[in-house]
Image (cartoon, rainbow, N blue to C red):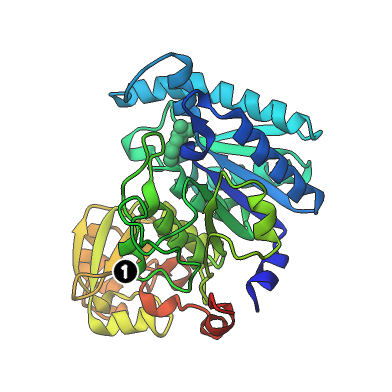
């Protein structure tokens, strides 16, 4: 499959656009927003569904309030977002209105999607909005999102929404052309990487954390988001948000930006949710035998493979499974509490009842509730490497 073929199958696109693209010296850059909206409307004309994850609330609010310099505290950022979010939506509403399109606003926090029920509710809402042809514009609910509940940045928010909305492609529009082999701000020799077949530590290392004065994530968070999205089997592109017609060019299969190929053997939606949305409440250390069973044989985790338990968690909580070398290899939902596992670890399944006085499950974590994140399970589509290489 060529890049063009991958992209020609795309019918639902998630576009993420950062504050660095949307805002200029005078707050929201209306020309850029109109240009982006025209581009999205053109995709709609071609029969593509589009969901937009847009930043810009804080930057816009700050400008409206005439605040110079950096906002100092989280409450100040939250307050600025309260002012800016409404303005942002009005601008989008006017711009999409010119194309006869309606917009809908969805503001999310992490705690909204760690709850499976609310996750499914959001999903139902998004699918209804898609069915109605409404352009859904999503942002973090900045006014309530602090520490525990914040997505961290909109790159991560978009990665989570890709799962909820079952997007076929994620496009991250940013202030640079894509991912470079070194920081383009520091070196003129920096070269664009057109294709990433796998998010290796080397690829992560070339992306810097430095954000812009208005955006939060920097290139690092875009690459981390790419790693998640591709692990869900969705291609991911980082491209220049200020380039006119960039979305149309991408969908035409033109070599623009950096394309991250989707992984083979990717996660199901539920396992993706377990792996990347839930916050682990503890750690379970497992032996080499259990590691092989989980990673290579796709089996459940049994008490016999557990060597140590860290943390205090209850039935149904998410925990990380760690190998003897200390590497996290999987995340899953436990069938027993931390205290119960401490009592039965190292034992054969048949002994569970003898020790606890009851046995509700054979497994500590059932394979259906286990997302193995170890490298071996998420392989790149090797057969596509050759045909999709930049020179082809
Ligand atoms: N949610 C923030 C805003 O709308 C932006 C977060 C980010 O830039 O990643 O201003």
* Rendered-image quadrant of the C terminus: bottom right
Query: Can you see residue 132?
Result: yes
At 39% from the left edge and 58% from the top edge, which residue is drawn? Answer: 224
Nearer to me, 47 or 351: 47
Residue at image coords 25%, 61%: 283
Q: Residues within 10 Å of mark 1 (few under 14, many from 20)?
A: few
Q: Residue furthest front?
A: 188
Residue in view at x 44 percent, y 27 percent = 58
Query: Percent position (x, y) of residue 278?
Result: 40, 52
Furthest residue in direction top, as rendered: 65
Location of residue 391 with respect to 318 vertically, above or below: below
- Depth order, front residue of 383/42: 42
- Tell me residue 75's x, y (percent): 34, 22
> Where is ligand 1, by quadrant?
top left
Task: Name which quarter of the figure residue 184 lies in.
Answer: bottom left
Give the left or right position of residue 17, taking residue 7 as reference.
left
74 and 251: which is toward the camera = 251
In the rendered image, the quadrant that contains the N terminus is bottom right
Report whether 258 appears left or right of 90.
left
Which quadrant of the figure has residue 252? bottom right
Dividing the picture into quadrants, the one containing residue 262 is bottom right
Task: Look at the image and tell me whether residue 82 can be seen.
Answer: no
Secondary structure beneath label 1: helix
- Eyeballing the image, is 302 above or below 310? below
Residue at the disc numbered 1? 201
Residue beneath the point at 39% across and 66% down: 360
> Eyeballing the image, is 369 above or below 209?
below
What percent of the width, then of the height, locates residue 215?
41, 38
């Amino acid at each position: 499959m060529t890049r063009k073929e991958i992209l020609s199958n795309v019918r639902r696109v998630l576009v993420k656009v950062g504050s660095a693209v949307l805002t200029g010296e005078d707050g929201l850059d209306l020309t850029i927003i109109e240009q982006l909206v025209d581009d999205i409307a053109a995709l709609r004309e071609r029969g593509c569904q589009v969901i937009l994850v847009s930043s810009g609330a804080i930057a816009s609010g700050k400008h409206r309030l005439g605040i110079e310099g950096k906002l100092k505290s989280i409450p100040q950022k939250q307050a600025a977002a309260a002012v800016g979010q409404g303005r942002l939506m009005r601008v989008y509403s006017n711009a999409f209105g010119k194309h006869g399109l309606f917009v809908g606003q969805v503001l999310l926090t992490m705690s909204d999607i760690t709850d499976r029920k609310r996750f499914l509710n959001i999903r139902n809402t998004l699918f209804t909005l898609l069915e109605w042809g409404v352009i859904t514009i999503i942002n973090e609910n900045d006014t309530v999102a602090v520490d525990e509940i914040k997505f961290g940045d909109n790159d991560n928010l978009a990665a989570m929404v890709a799962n909820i909305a079952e997007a076929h492609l994620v496009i991250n529009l940013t202030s640079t052309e894509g991912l470079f082999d070194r920081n383009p701000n520091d070196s003129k020799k920096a070269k664009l990487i057109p294709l990433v077949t796998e998010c290796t530590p080397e690829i992560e290392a070339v992306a810097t954390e430095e954000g812009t004065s208005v955006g939060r994530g920097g290139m690092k968070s875009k690459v981390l988001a790419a790693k998640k999205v591709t692990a869900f089997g969705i291609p991911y592109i980082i491209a220049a948000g200020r380039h006119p017609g960039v979305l149309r060019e991408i969908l035409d299969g033109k070599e623009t930006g950096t394309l991250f190929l989707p992984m083979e053997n990717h996660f199901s939606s539920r396992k993706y949710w377990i792996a990347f949305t839930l916050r682990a409440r503890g750690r379970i250390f497992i032996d080499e035998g259990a590691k092989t069973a989980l990673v290579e044989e796709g089996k459940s985790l049994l008490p016999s493979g557990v060597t140590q338990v860290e943390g205090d968690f209850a039935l149904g909580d998410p925990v990380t499974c760690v190998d003897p070398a200390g590497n996290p290899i999987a995340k899953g939902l436990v069938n027993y509490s931390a205290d119960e596992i401490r009592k039965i670890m190292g034992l054969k399944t048949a002994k569970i009842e003898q020790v606890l006085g009851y046995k509700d499950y054979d497994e500590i974590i059932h394979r259906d509730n286990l997302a193995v994140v170890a490298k071996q399970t998420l392989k790149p589509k090797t057969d596509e490497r050759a045909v999709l290489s930049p020179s082809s």
